[in-house]
Amino acid sequence: MTKTRTQWVCQNCGRTTPREMGRCPKCGEFNTMVEVVMADPGKSADRRPLAGPASRPLRLSEIDGDAEARLALPLEEFARVLGGGIVPGSAVLVSGDPGIGKSTLLLQVAALMAEQGPVLYVSGEESVRQIKMRALRLAPASGAANGPLPDNLFLLAETNLDAMLSHIESIRPVLMIVDSIQTAYSGDIASAAGSVSQVRECALRLTGAAKMSGLAVFLIGHVTKDGAIAGPRVLEHIVDTVLYLEGDRYQSYRLLRGIKNRFGPTSEVGVFEMRGSGMIEVPNPSEAFLAERMVNAPGSAIAVTMEGTRPLLVEVQALTSPTSFGNPRRTPNGVDFNRLLLITAVLTKRLSLKLFDQDVFVNVVGGLQVEEPAADLAVAAAIASSVRDLPVPADLALMGEVGLSGELRAVAQMDARLKEAAKLGFRRALVPKTVRRGDPFPGGIEIIQARSLREALDVALGKPAGREH
């Protein structure tokens, strides 16, 4: 009979303790310790090693260092985030809010990859009939040559981990998708499916199977109410790649963001549009985000932000109105709340802009979440434009970080930002004034430099300044 033991595990950092504690001794968070029942580790001594049967040290010179060819993925936006394709033997964790489109996107990937070899789609939340109904709806988006469900796409409704691994031995797929890891359970663990110990154990064994057999494993993960992946952070350390599918549920655009990638760049982003036929790639997201822009409207400015290695132009809107309460409100959507407070404080202190009796609302159009400080200048210009009721020129793109003294600071990858703005038809760009030690600014766009936020807003709202070409 399997012996069990009880431990308390922190859902935030994974720290284990032998008794109940109200506060985690490692991360200091309250009410994060949950009770889990774990099997005796001695009963799991017969597990196969994760690295394969050859358990002996090898000299570095003896190891084949040639890069293994990636599996081509026809979805270019997805392949961009992965670093150019699917690496055989890799484990990828895809997470996101409920209903954001994780299962839809990965079923499209399964249909496309089935043309290159067997694909096993395992679902613990839907029956095979439900999956087929969804696949028929996604047929136009999948673009599979042999129809929405090719002969090499195998569907399985299963939650038992041992049964999943046995099907891997019989089918020998090139890709396996588990939807979701929280529904899988191992008979070696006495706790219920979805618990910390079950999620960690199933992820370890599936990752080990990927390393041993060379198949790629995609795991769909649930998130908590705070937006973090359910379970301890150790789950993110087990897999090779962590992807988040983000977006406003009331907007059609979805962003697939890379958080961790052992085989490619991190913080890369792929853009999709959710339609009735599935997730459609958006090859030029800047043009899509600016499609509904109202030209020469007060309170609107164009920011050039970087998502990984891709520059994006987004519209930042601001609205100020007299407050009806004692304390004016600061309401951001798409920008950091503390960053908005900083910008409004600089506008009030350094530019004498009267915002103490104004509610300030800031919105990034398209549901995009802008986190980098390069959008500070566009946010400040949009707020000042709304207060003074003066429009920012429609052909002007803004980029720059705002300091506490009201100065403008340079941002990284300026050339890429300027080239993207010029490609979309913007004739002028307002940037911080810096000592240019590298190559000159790219051609095709007029560069206007400003040293301070005051100088920049004078240009954006109608006053001339020094120009460079």
Image (tube, grey):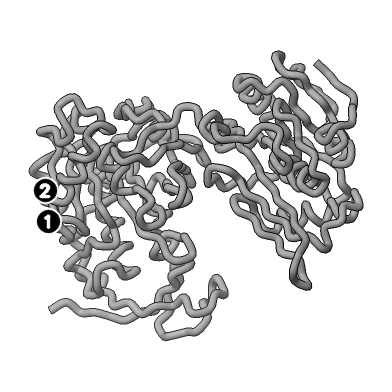
**In the rendering, at what x and y percent does residue 160 appear?**
16, 61
Badge 2, how many Cα within 10 Å: few under 14, some, many 20+? Answer: few
* Residue at image location 61% in from the left, 37% down from the top: 314
Quarter holding the N terminus is bottom left
**In the rendering, at what x and y percent does residue 279 appear?**
35, 38
Residue type of the residue flagged with mark 2: His
**In the rendering, at what x and y percent does residue 119 appear?**
18, 38
Q: Left or right: where does residue 41 sit relative to residue 398? A: left
To which residue does mark 1 refer?
163
Residue type of the residue flagged with mark 1: Ala
Q: Quadrant of residue 426?
A: top right
Q: Left or right: where does residue 14 sit relative to residue 165? A: right
Q: Does 55 appear above or below 86?
A: below
Quarter holding the C terminus is top right
From mark 1 to mark 2, how far is it between C-alphas? 6 Å
Q: Are marks 1 and 2 in contact (CB under 8 Å)?
A: yes
Q: Left or right: where does residue 384 sit relative to residue 233? A: right
* Residue at image location 49% in from the left, 64% down from the top: 226
Q: Quadrant of residue 113?
A: top left
The label on residue 167 is 2
Camera sees residue 463 = yes
Q: Does 258 appear above or below 295?
A: below
Question: SS for tag 2?
Answer: helix
* Residue at image location 40% in from the left, 82% down from the top: 18
User: In this view of the protein, which residue sits in the foreground, 259 or 384?
Assistant: 384
Q: Does 188 appear above or below 77?
A: below
Q: How many marks?
A: 2
